[in-house]
Amino acid sequence: MKKQYVIKLRPLLVCILIPLIVGGLAGFITRNMKAYESLAKPSLTPPSAVFPVVWTILYILMGLSSYLIYISKSPDRKKALTVYAMQLALNFLWPIVFFGLQLYLLSFAVILILWFMIFWMLRLFYPIRRLSAYLNIPYLLWVAFAAYLNLGIYFLNR
């Protein structure tokens, strides 16, 4: 027999809005992209217009996954949501270090820590609700790709 889940609209909206607001605020803080546009970039760098679309989708997926953890009755949900909040804080910090401060090697260190935090989050989410972990696999992969771009920019612009 499958479990029935009741959608709680207010918590769902809050869970989706939190990462969207965090990402939007980081984007607003780092909106001056002139320095980035003038950098030499790795060959696999997508057009700039791709980034906000991808990040918006990833933030929505993060929100959905955090909602599924939030409504769970698991005794481990508090720890999982704490790690979720920690990775979201690093997600906020990375563009400030990369775009705002233009500290490309430091931002690479931040994004590596972010990747490991996302991986830890997935490991905590999986036993609570597998779908929550699966929803974040694109995020983990995108951050790995972003780390490649970050390191490439560091080496191409020293």
Image: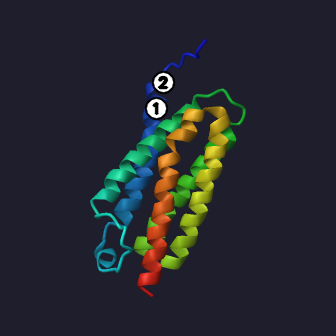
The disc labelled 2 sits on which kind of residue?
Lys
Q: CA distance from mark 1 to mark 2?
A: 6 Å
Please say if the residues under marks 1 and 2 sit with CB atoms less than 8 Å apart: yes
**Residue closer to the observer: 69 or 50:** 50
- Say what secondary structure mark 1 lies in: helix
Task: Bin the neighbour count of mark 2 within 10 Å (Cα to Cα): few under 14, some 14-19, many 20 and up.
Answer: few
Q: Residue at x 58, y 65 (%)?
A: 112
How far across and how far down the image is residue 58, in percent?
A: 43, 47
Q: Quadrant of the C terminus?
A: bottom left
Q: Quadrant of the N terminus?
A: top right
Report the disc number at residue 145. none
The disc labelled 1 sits on which kind of residue?
Leu
Q: Residue at x 62, y 39 (%)?
A: 125
Q: Which residue is mark 1?
A: 12
Q: Is residue 146 left or right of residue 129?
A: left
Q: Is residue 58 left or right of residue 35?
A: right
Q: Which residue is mark 2?
A: 8
Rendered view: 116 above or below 56:
below
- Say what secondary structure mark 2 lies in: loop
Q: Residue furthest top?
A: 1
Rendered view: 13 above or below 49:
above
Task: Bin the neighbour count of mark 1 within 10 Å (Cα to Cα): few under 14, some 14-19, many 20 and up.
Answer: some
How far across and how far down the image is residue 25, in percent?
A: 39, 57
Q: Is residue 76 left or right of residue 155?
A: right
Q: Is residue 103 visible?
A: no
Numbered label tally: 2
